[in-house]
Image (cartoon, rainbow, N blue to C red):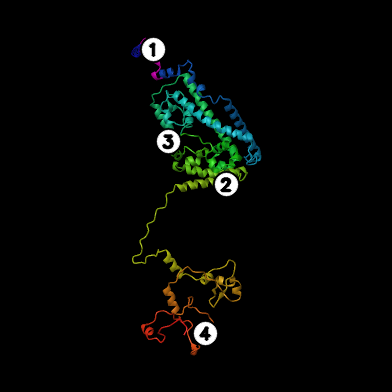
Amino acid sequence: TRGALGKMATLADSFLADLDDLSDDEAPDDVAAADASVPQSAQDGERRSGGAGSSRPSGDTLNAVSKLTGSERYARVVAQVREALAADAKAAASSGDGTAASSRPHLGVVDENAYRLIVDCNALSADIDDEIQTVHNFVRDQYRVKFPELESLVTHPIDYARVVRAIGNEMDVTRVDLDAVLPSAAVMVVSVTAATTAGAPLGEATLKETLAACDRQMQMDEDRRQLVQLVQSRMDRTAPNLSAVLGSEVAARLMGVAGGLTALSKMPANNVQVLGQKRKHAAGFSAAAAVKAGDMHVGHIFQCDIIQRKTPPALRMRAARLVAGKCALMARMDAFGQDPAASAGKAMRAEIEAKIEKWQELPPARTAKPLPIPGGEAKKRRGGKRARAMKERYGQSDMQKAANRLNFNQAEEEYGLDGEGLGTLGTSAGMAAASGKLRITAKQTKMKVPKRAQDKWANKGGSGTALSVNGMASSLAFTPVQGIELVNPNQKPRDAGPVSGTQSVFSELRGFKSARPS
């Protein structure tokens, strides 16, 4: 059954192809004469557009493709914007100085109606951008029959519409004045390419609809420019510092998502950074690459000029965190009505740009370390217990440290002919200094004196050891045998230690001793 159906389909296709060839060969004489007078490409254009007098299918008409300009929201918002701009122009003219400063409300106090209009303007501006691109695709498809190379020469939608409007159905482009539409270099390229193009003139219906689409594009671009102008003027009044950092459009979007300037000023910087973000699914892949590329954890702040135009892609996430923190500060300033001249916002923007430029600078080159001097002494780098003990042994005393210190706002006492200062050993020592007695309590040192050094100092009569005697000690000693005897009080007393062999053997005290009483 399946093979029979395939054979029937093949026979039907071949039969239809034979009918098409027969109808082409047996065309009437008047139709053939009419077709002979029109180029083949023009006939193809007529077939595509449905002929000069035929009606185009509903899916290919301009009104079917572009429906935004006929909506009630578009008409209402554009009318409100024009009325607001007219009122601002009238107020500026009546003020005499070119600004409507007298009619400005207090900064930080946002009118709900004006704020809602700003939000509507932002939403409509985004829709107009999408609609302009849609109409541009329609015009490009229609005008491709006439000038197929034009879409690669002029890529901007509005410029493309102006060129199509200026050329129209003219085959000799040198007769068309394009200097008011394109730069001189682009005009030369378009003229040379049009002279060698293989395009053909459009039909009346196609040309009329194409020109109408161009007019609609330019009208939507003009309306979008008015929307941006109103948003910029309103944001410069409501949040001047925030607008100076982010730009009027991005600042208005940020306020719209946050719910107002007051609500934005109460948000922390990490929440301001993600305001307006779109949730994206990683589709099974790791989210780290998306975060690094700036596709996640970013909001409206990521679309400002500082990040998109002045920051390389590798630093945009870091710049977004920086800008979010500064915007939180600027929103609080605007909420309290501070700095209406936006000088703080401009200074903050310059600071952000300077930091981003600093990030892009190359690190300083490492300088080659010079070789040590031949034969020079190596620097001692020893540390530890022995090094600390040596440093403590040869360090300054407490009196030297006190003499080298000075008290604030107190005169230093001097002594001697050279006028050497006493430092904190002077009157700052208190009652001891007033009585002429300087006493400094020495701190207990952690240094341990070896036993051999103690014995050496004791034999030399040094002080500070166990052999130190009282100052009242006398060199006269009274003994019951000899009476008055001169002795050295600092002499080390003899202990009952080991004695020489002669003294131990031939001593008078040698003999047996008994503990029993005799």
Q: Residue at x 44, y 24 (%)?
A: 141
Q: Which residue is mark 1?
A: 32
Specify few, some or many for label 2: CA neighbours under 10 Å numbering under 14, 14-19, or 20 or more: some
Distance CA(mark 4)–CA(mark 2): 86 Å
Distance CA(mark 2)–CA(mark 3): 43 Å
Q: Which mark is nearer the camera, 4 or 1?
A: 4
Q: Tell me which numbered mark, 4 or 2, is placed earlier along the sequence.
A: 2
Q: Residue 115: name its quadrant.
A: top right
Distance CA(mark 1)–CA(mark 3): 62 Å
Amino acid type, mark 1? Ala
Distance CA(mark 4)–CA(mark 3): 98 Å
Label 4 sits on a secondary structure element that is: loop
Amino acid type, mark 3? Phe
Q: Which mark is nearer the camera, 4 or 2?
A: 4
**Residue sitting nearer the eye, 31 or 450:** 450
Q: Which residue is mark 4?
A: 474
Distance CA(mark 1)–CA(mark 2): 77 Å
Q: Which residue is mark 2?
A: 344
Q: Which mark is nearer the camera, 2 or 3?
A: 3
Q: Does 72 sit above or below residue 374?
A: above
Label 3 sits on a secondary structure element that is: loop
Say whether residue 167 is visible.
Answer: no
Q: Tell me which numbered mark, 4 or 3, is placed earlier along the sequence.
A: 3
Q: Which mark is nearer the camera, 1 or 3?
A: 3
Left or right: residue 508 compared with residue 76 = left
Specify few, some or many for label 3: CA neighbours under 10 Å numbering under 14, 14-19, or 20 or more: few
Q: Does 454 sit above or below residue 371?
A: below
Say whether residue 58 is visible.
Answer: yes
